[in-house]
Amino acid sequence: MLVGNPAVLSLSPVIHMAWITAAELDATYFVAELEGDNFRQFVRARGPIVGLGGANLRGLNVTIPFKEEALAVAHQASARAQRAGAANLLLFEPGGTV
């Protein structure tokens, strides 16, 4: 899943669905365009997702304008993300760790 605003013009869903299909995985990749300050709320309420049969998110790709906020909500971050002051990937671990 890609989260951002604007995000609908991104090629990420096409790119990711190509390798997901090629690998024959039972997965999907889609876009969520969020408004304003909805990012933290979205991350906290990350599953189950309506329309996906109750599936929970395992992670998010993050694009503008939420990259800095993605780093701020993460419990752990790579040294590279810390140096950049931003994150473009969030992984959701069992127990609620991001």
Image (spheres, rainbow, N blue to C red):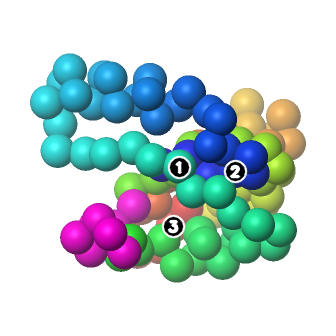
Measuring from the top left, give residue 93's x and y in whole percent: 42, 61
Whether tag 1 and tag 2 are in contact, CB under 8 A, the answer is: yes
Query: As drawn, is 63 to the left or to the right of 26?
Result: right
Q: In the displayed image of the protein, which residue is found farthest to the front?
A: 9
Q: Nearer the viewer, residue 70 or 95?
A: 70
Label number found at residue 4: 2
Secondary structure under the numbered disc 2 in the rendered image: strand
Q: What distance separates the C-alpha of mark 3 from that of mark 2?
A: 21 Å
Q: Are marks 3 and 2 in contact (CB under 8 Å)?
A: no
Identified by mark 1, the residue type is Val
Q: CA distance from mark 1 to mark 2?
A: 8 Å
Q: Nearer the viewer, residue 41 or 86?
A: 41
| Mark 1 or mark 3: whose residue is earlier in sequence | 1
Q: Any mark on residue 59, and which?
A: none
Residue visible at 37% across and 75% down in the picture: 50
Residue 97 — which label?
3
Residue occupied by mark 1? 31
Magenta-span inclusion, residue 8: no
* Prevailing secondary structure of the magenta residues: loop
- Measured from the top left, where is residue 63 in percent x and y? 71, 42
Q: Is residue 57 left or right of residue 52?
A: right
Residue 40 in percent (x, y) is at 70, 72
Q: Which SS class for mark 1?
A: strand
**Helix, strand or loop under label 3:** loop
